[in-house]
Amino acid sequence: MNLERHHRNYDLHSWSGLALGLFIFVVCFTGCLALFDAELHAWEDPAKRMAVPEQPAPMDATFTEWISEQLGEDGKAEFINFTFPTAYQPYYTAYMNFETPNADGGHDHTAVQQSWNAATGAPFEERGDGLSAWLRDFHRDLMWPAKLGGRSVGRGLVGIAGVILLLSIVSGVVAHTKIMPELFTLRFFRSMRLKWQDTHKVLGLWGLPFYTMIAVTGAIIGVVTLLAPVIAVLTFKGDTEALFEAVIGAPLEASGRPANMLSVDDIRGFTSDATNEPAWYVVANNWGDENARFDVYFQSTSQLKIVDGYQISGVTGERIPDSQFENVTAGSRTSQAVTPLHYGTYGGIVLKFVYFALGLSLAVITALGMMMWVERRLYGNAGKRSPRVYKALSKLTVGVTCGLPLASAFIFYADKLVPIAPDARITMIGQAYFACWAVGILHACVRGNDYQAAKELLYVTAAMVVGLPFLNATVTGEFFVAHLTTASSVSALTDLTALIFGLLMLLAVWSLPDARKEKQARRSENRDTVAADDASLMAAE
Amino acid sequence: MSPIVIGVALAVVVAIGLATWKAPRLTSVILWALVATIFLGAALLIAFPGPFAEKAIWLSLLVPVIWAGLQFWVYWERRSWVVASGLIGISLASAALVFTLEPSLG
């Protein structure tokens, strides 16, 4: 590769990492926590910590009555989902979206949710979305507000982070001309900058297949929500109905003749053709009509598929032949693999921890890349701006990257300790999250020593993570040691993981330096020394 | 159309034109690569034979890769004017296909 092209490629790697580096860090870090939303939900809501009963309570009458109550006389169901108890969610849950006519001649749309105890069939008092929903959805769509376009815009923005990450990966790999030696070079006892640079390269190269996969699948999941509608509307010149029909087929029309629905208790007995697993959840179409249909889904935890499923008549339970589910093509199979690949749902909890470690290393690589860029400009020979600009960037990087873990730990405490109405819980969690993150950024800005600021923020985070089992024990009375094999085992294992991870984090933070050890060779003060140092780094690059 | 809307649209067109003239790579990587991806995607969906739903799935899998690929090419190509004109050309050619052909439903 000629030098000019090498420099252009290096520029691309720098700007893509710099312009959106912090955003990519946020997406990577939040993704690590989003992996465990089911486990965190069990930790979050003590009322729902229970084992799946061997003989779950029959639910059909309760579920049917709940639907009738919600719809009233003139409501029309748009979407109905009923989920059976599983190990991670050992209770029944139903979601429904429905429309009701309003005074203006239009329709109001409402979404409702209800959970029931699987052993008794009694309804749970809903606690409202909180900690786990925030951690999951902040990664998926940044909890983007409806006023600014809603969640699909947020999801698209996260997808753009995936595209930029992919671009950074490709340009980063192309920039490295000595990949083999760099795979095995980690000069841990040399200068700070060399240490960061080697770590950035070694982690980046060893984790390359994972990072590429996560960038491509993340970009697909996110960008598709943003671009696919635009492309599709262009293709059909704005005729969205024709578009939907071409992609998902004509919708199933209701006959207008009422009929009794097949009992959801009977559907539990349907099993997957592939795994023999019982039904996980069903989606009802045309509820209460002769043309009703159930889409029956099964967990697909050991295959690269989101779900496994088939369609049955909602009245007779007869299997519908040649449905969309059974018509598997290469495209649909590949598309089904994208989400499990991204979220690591196909290999159990061990795989999730592997994803967690690799995801965290990607966040570290992104942060190191930014820190190296700033360091070379603040103490090296590169860059044209005043040191004040680079110092501000350095503080912002420390504040954002170390403040985010702190905010993530803080909302565990907010969720457990703040008594609040179910509807307001998620808003309170969001406010606590951003307030704590802002405090972290502010601390980094006013501390005066970025190394100390980072250490302090990470120390507090680690201490808070270590404290999670004790917080849980104080609030719920369940100390994890006694519950590792009980119905609260998921929550107890979450406590144990937090304790181990927090202690490891304390150890790691303890080993971080308190200040920059090398001579404070400011650009303006000692350009020659710095130029020599830079030359050796450039040669290494 | 109101004169204000026309004025704003003209101002945007002039601004994009100026930006492309002054900084072709930067404008291309931010804007033209995205525009080319959208139109190229729509053109591929129309022009390729086969069942529409299947094409739509493959396209949704390919769109981010096409976008990142075009962005990478912006900095790989030696001549900056080739980058901008290439992406604008792809967009125009694809747009011509999109607005003249009907989608093949397969």
Image: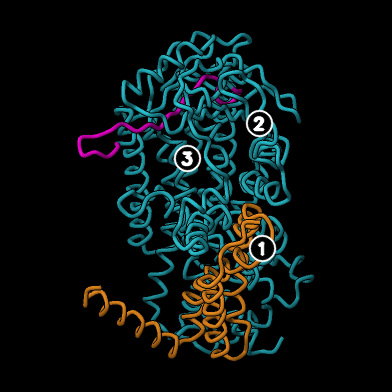
Chain colours: A cyan, B orange
Which of pointers 1 and 2 indicates the residue nearer the eye?
Answer: 2
In the rendered image, which residue does mark 2 sit on? A310
Query: Can you tell which of label 1 and label 3 is closer to the viewer?
Result: 1
At label 2, the amino acid type is: Tyr
Same chain? Circles 3 and 2: yes
Q: Magenta span has A96?
A: yes
The residue drawn where x is 52% and y is 68% is B38
For residue A336, above or below residue A260 = below
Read off the residue under disc 3: A463
**Near-viewer residue (A317 or A201):** A317
Q: CA distance from mark 1 to mark 2?
A: 41 Å
Label 1 neighbourhood size at 10 Å, few (<14), some (14-19), many (20+)? many
Q: Tell me residue A264's x, y (percent).
A: 55, 17
State which quarter of the image contains the N terminus of chain B: bottom left
Q: Is residue A195 visible?
A: no
Q: CA distance from mark 1 to mark 3?
A: 29 Å
Task: In the displayed orientation, state which residue is furthest to the right.
Answer: A180
- Which segment is the magenta one? A86-107
* Chain bearing mark 2: A
Residue A12 spot, x, y in % from top left: 56, 77
Give the residue drawn at x 54%, y 50%.
A510
Q: Please give the name of the residue rendered at 20% of the width and 35% of the height, measured from the top-left corner.
A: A103
**In magenta stretch: residue A497:** no
Instruction: Name the spot of residue A292 as percent of width and height, x first.
Output: 53, 26
* Residue A126 in which image quadrant: top left
Local secondary structure at mark 1: helix
Residue receiving disc 1: A204
Which of labels 3 and 2 is toward the front? 2
Q: Which x, y percent locates residue A420?
A: 30, 29
Q: Chain of mark 1?
A: A
